[in-house]
Amino acid sequence: MDMNDVATRGLVLLGCGKMGSAMLAGWLRNGLPPKSVWVIEPNPSDWLKSQGVNMGGDLPKDPAIALVAVKPQMMADALPDVKSLGDGKTLVISVAAGTPIRTFEEMLGDKTPIIRAMPNTPAAIGHGITALIGNAKAMPDDMDLAEALLWSIGQTVRLDNEGQMDAVTAVSGSGPAYVFHMIETLAAAGEAEGLPAELAMELAKATVGGAGDLAENADEDPTQLRVNVTSPNGTTQAALEVLMDDETGLGALMRRAVAAAAARSRELANE
Ligand SMILES: NC(=O)C1=CN([C@@H]2O[C@H](COP(=O)(O)OP(=O)(O)OC[C@H]3O[C@@H](n4cnc5c(N)ncnc54)[C@H](O)[C@@H]3O)[C@@H](O)[C@H]2O)C=CC1
Ligand SMILES: O=C(O)[C@@H]1CCC=N1
């Protein structure tokens, strides 16, 4: 099964909010025909309404993929829509934080191939990263198909075990928010040093964007890239002495933030 089968048999997207829209934008941009997509979404955005995808009406009986992108707390309401599909031949992919594969197996039956995936919102511009892991019924072909679909919205990585998913969620699923917050705080600090707000924000966005691109594309690792910026006894060193303090620095703060996100992911499994 490949992306041509998705175009032929169809893809059902359950929930098209922020993450569903980011993924749908990527698939359509990569040539998935809008008429191959059926969206179930009680509150469709104007953007969604203008995409030419199927909304309402009958779903295909045997879609290649049903992708679940509702909040974990909505899962019990939403999953009956998926249950009638495919008779074990439809690959179910969930991007919900926290919700374990066993919840889907309990609701859909353990014949169903199920893949749990964790994307992130840079998917909207094809720069996401999605981690994935399948249940025992997900065959290599199913994993390849999920990867082909998710590849259209950025990089993909396969996990060794589902237990890694809480930490992955805390690092890359939620991570874009930490980086956006860093932009906000860098701009605010520039303002506090006397820059006009607009200029401070322009500098902060371009700096984080440029540093991110460099970290992804350079041969040197982030540690060496940091050293390259840091002239002995210069301005960067003065800042890093604050940021790299063992107790009050960014490392300690990031450790607490990621631990809090991972703990919340584990809690969501029971909501
Ligand atoms: N926003 C993000 O950065 C990421 C979100 N996720 C996961 O994606 C899922 C969706 O999150 P968001 O898009 O942020 O939330 P959202 O609230 O923007 O989207 C959820 C959508 O589901 C719809 N919905 C509610 N009940 C439904 C039902 N019974 N049937 C069909 N649709 C229904 C809502 O109207 C809403 O548009 C969550 O499980 C979240 O954990 C995963 C990775 C990143
Ligand atoms: O905040 C959340 O729960 C979701 C999962 C990862 C990003 N957003």
Image (cartoon, grey):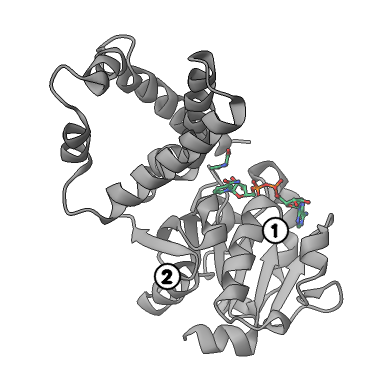
Q: Is mark 2 within 8 Å of ligand 1?
A: no
Residue farthest to the top, as pictured: 247
Which of the labelled discs sits on residue 147, or is there none? 2
Residue farthest to the left, as pictured: 232
Q: What element carries label 2?
A: helix
- For discs 1 and 2, the disc positioned in front in the rendered view: 2
Residue 65 placement: quadrant: bottom right
**Amino acid identity at mark 2:** Glu
x and y, in percent, of residue 139 in the image: 39, 75
Query: In percent of the image, x 65 and y 58: which residue is there?
Result: 20
x and y, in percent, of residue 12 in the image: 68, 72
Query: In percent of the image, x 58 and y 80: which residue is there?
Result: 64
x and y, in percent, of residue 47 in the image: 77, 62
**Amino acid identity at mark 1:** Leu
Q: Is residue 267 among the parts visible in the rendering?
A: no
- 12 shown above or below 22: below
- Give the crowd class for mark 2: few <14, some 14-19, many >=20 residues within 10 Å: some
**Viewer-nearest residue: 180 or 6:** 180
x and y, in percent, of residue 158 in the image: 34, 60
Query: In percent of the image, x 65 and y 82: which residue is there?
Result: 10
Q: Name the image quarter holding the C terminus.
A: top right
**Viewer-nearest residue: 256 or 265:** 256
- 144 shown above or below 3: above
> Which residue is identified by label 1?
79
- 264 shown above or below 151: above
Locate residue 118 relative to residue 254 in the image: left or right.
Answer: right
- Give the crowd class for mark 1: few <14, some 14-19, many >=20 residues within 10 Å: some
Query: What separation in Å lies between label 1 and label 2 (alpha carbons)?
Result: 22 Å
Query: In percent of the image, x 42 and y 39: which residue is there?
Result: 208
Q: Is mark 1 on a helix, strand or loop?
A: loop
Residue 80 placement: quadrant: bottom right
Nearest to N terminus: mark 1 or mark 2: 1
